[in-house]
Each structure stands twice: as C-alpha cells, then as structure tokens.
Amino acid sequence: MTASLRSPTSPVIVLLAAGEGRRYGGIKQLAEIEGQPMVRRVARAALEHGVPVIVVTGAHPEQVEAVLDDLPLQIIRHAGWQDGMGSSLAAGIRCVDVSFPQASAALLCLADQPLLGTAPIQQMLRRHAEAPQRLLVTEQDGISGPPVLFPRDCFAALTAWSGSRGAHALIEREAARVERFASTDGIDVDTPQDLQHVRDWLAIDSHR
C-alpha cells in the first residue's frame, strides 16, 4: 500500500500505532470512537492535510492494519515494537527516508490522540514552510510531546533511536531551535477511563 500523495519535498506524517495497549487492557487502536476504530479516525484526520502519511504498526498488526487497508497511506510493520516508542519512531523515519528521500520533515503523531484537531497540525505545517530548520513541539499543561515536527537534519539521529522516551532527549539537545505550540486537545488514550473521557467530551461538544 502506498501513499496517494508523493510530494517529494513536503513533510511526511508518521503516525505511530505500534503499542500493545497494556494499560488499556486490549487493542486500544481498535477502540470505537463515534462509530470507527480510533486508529482509523486519527489516520483519516492525518490524511486531510494533503501530505503523505506513514503508519507504523507493531503489536496486533493484522487487526490494526485491517481497519486501515482501504486508506491511501503507507503501512510499515515494525517487528521491534517491544523496544519502545523510540524504536517505532526510528522505524517510521527510516521508512520516510526510503519512500520519500526528499521529504523536508517528519511530523510525528500518535494513534491514541483522537481529539487532536486539524488546526494544530496546519499551524505546524505553515510554520515549517516559513522556517524549515525549526523543530516544532506541541505543549499541553507544561508537558511537551507529539505532534512534533522534525526537520530532515534530525533524521540521522532519529533512525538510531530506541527505548521508551520517544525523542525527548533530541528535543532537549536541540532546544535552541525548538518552537512550542500550545494545545488543549492532545489527550492520550492510555486507559479505559481516558477513552470514556474522550467519548464524554465528544458528546458534550456535539451538543454545543
């Protein structure tokens, strides 16, 4: 399966969907939100931005990939997903390098952030076009995390990444060129309680 949009110099969205869901107690990528699996909801939202999308799967690959099969994106199955988010990110970046060798950046997103709207991503993509060397980081309640946009010159470091901390060490090392974007809708679904919070929020929002 290949991405339908192959703009060689554009950023590429790397969507991590490789986790086991241990704290959730099941395949959280398939948790239903407004009638569709969470990973599909997030992937469809990513595709709205008009840039290529790569999804990294790992645990439960057949089930997760089955709900993405008809979408115009690229899937990479990462056998080393148990090594942590950093390892899955490295696999995604290596795929960007091979499939989109002229990509200007990789925009890391997580499949368990179903409330993330289009505005933060569009803001990052616009800022990247203006300042392509900047490392763009989302911040919520004083905590930095995905979505994160890594310029191409970060790829060499990211492809060697491993462990569970994602790319926080790289962000700290590159602090001089980091720009932070405030967010209020980046809730991670790690537990059934988180999922219920998301459903409650969406139910309230639909009646506004």
Image (cartoon, rainbow, N blue to C red):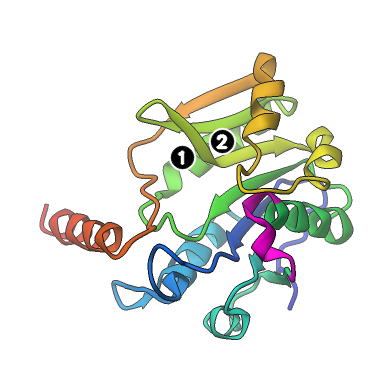
Q: Is residue 99 visible?
A: yes
The answer to whether residue 138 is left or right of residue 52 is left
Q: Residue extending furthest top? A: 176
Disc 1 element: helix
Distance between the Cα atoms at labels 1 and 2?
6 Å
Span colored in magenta: 79-86
Please give left or right for residue 54 compared with residue 141 in the image: right
Q: Position of residue 118 (x, y in %)?
A: 44, 48
Circles 1 and 2: CB distance less than 8 Å?
yes
172 horizontally vs 159: left or right:
left
Classed neighbour count for the residue bearing mark 1: other residues with Cα under 10 Å, few (<14), some (14–19), many (≥20):
some
In this figure, which residue is indicated by the disc labeled 2? 124
Give, as a three-letter code, the residue at label 1: Pro
Is most of the magenta stretch helix, strand or loop? Answer: helix
Q: Secondary structure at mark 2?
A: helix
Please state which of residues 69 and 189 is positioned toward the viewer in this rendering. Answer: 189
Q: Is residue 54 magenta?
A: no
Residue 45 % position (x, y): 48, 60
Residue under the image location 39 percent in, 45 percent down = 186
Q: Which residue occupies the extreme left position in the image?
A: 207
Q: Amino acid at mark 2?
A: Met
Q: Which residue is label 1 attached to?
A: 120
Q: Quadrant of the N terminus?
A: bottom right
